[in-house]
Image (tube, grey):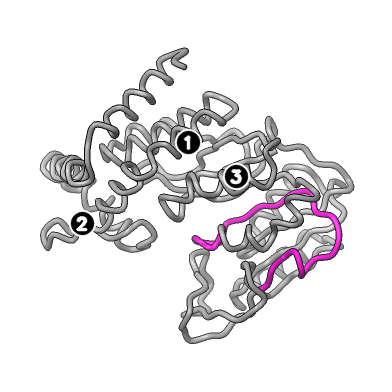
Amino acid sequence: MIKNKIDERFYYLMEFIKERNLEEMIDAIKQNFLYLKSSNLKKYYTITNYYNQYKLWGCIDLNNNDLELIENNAKALIYHQKDFEWFYNILNDYKSKLILLNILTYWLMIDDNKISKLIDNTYSQYFDLDLISVNQDEVFIDVGAYTGDTVAKYIDTFGKQKYKKIYCYEMVSDNIKYLNSTIKELNLSNVYIRDRAASDLNSKGFINSEKTSSVTQVIEEGDIEVETVKIDDDIKGRVTFIKMDIEGGELKALLGLKNKITKYKPKLAISVYHNNNHLWQIPKMLYYLNPKYKFYLRYYGGRLVPTEYILCAV
């Protein structure tokens, strides 16, 4: 149902997608990249170099006809238009709806004006006080704890009295050293570091480097073996709040948490930007586990490429 200009723009985009096949969508996105290249070469290379550096969404090189990024964007829009429409309709505020609309529009148009308007500096990432509240009995799980930056933001936002336990999952040894230092500097108790990767299996995986990094992924083959665990099995008892940012491993980690999510219905702040399809797959999974969740999107990323958009479920 169209109620305002945001709805109108969203359903216009949906109709545009419906009227095109995959080849037409690929060509439309390619033409928009070519226009950007001709009109602002510096911005074009800044954007394409970013995509090619991180490779999460596919690479792009128009000079050599490498259209992986364009094809991935087009496939997400064409094959999952109904999924995005479902997601739009269950989002609980128009701020969230506008974020979804502008991300999808960017995938098509490569228009950074759609992204720069979304940046939210009101609250710390993951801790929107209009959505998230905590108390002294909070059991907070930080999946992808990195060097302790999120724990520090939690304490800065809510204070040292507003948790019972904190569990930090981090698999890179250099990061764990910094994480320990952060916890020590903050003088925190009842914080437990799990030096392993959250996943859907209690097994083994690999990483390629132990450099301090926020973008390390678990892979099937690599230089360093890491333990993978289902958090359902790794932590006993109740959890109340889960933050997750693990470079594309979110779906597997959530599968390893499905029992706790179903039973305890914790607050969730989940990164959904590491894969185009996570933007609909993760909310659908969580809706299946708990249809009473209310969903919100918040954007904390940069101005040129859409990243750091967070799904909040409460």
Residue 155 rendering spot, x and y as whole percentages: 76, 49
Residue that sits furthest to the top in the current view: 3
Q: Which residues are magenta?
A: 229-250
Which circle's residue, 2 or 3, is located before the other in the chain? 2
Q: Which residue does the numbered mark 1 point to in the structure image?
A: 119
Residue 211 rendering spot, x and y as whole percentages: 51, 76
**At numbered mark 3, what does the secondary structure look like: helix, strand or loop?**
loop
Which circle's residue, 2 or 1, is located before the other in the chain? 2
Which circle's residue, 1 or 3, is located before the other in the chain? 1
Q: Which residue does the numbered mark 2 point to in the structure image?
A: 67
Residue 145 rendering spot, x and y as whole percentages: 64, 62
* Residue 40 seen in this snapshot: no
The residue drawn where x is 11% and y is 59% is 63
Residue 248 drawn in magenta:
yes
Q: Which residue does the numbered mark 3 point to in the structure image?
A: 125
Viewer-side residue, 199 vs 114: 199
Pointer 3: residues within 10 angstroms few (<14), some, or many (20+)?
A: some
| Above or below for 61 versus 173 | above
In the rendered image, which quarter contains the C terminus?
Answer: top right
**At numbered mark 2, what does the secondary structure look like: helix, strand or loop?**
loop
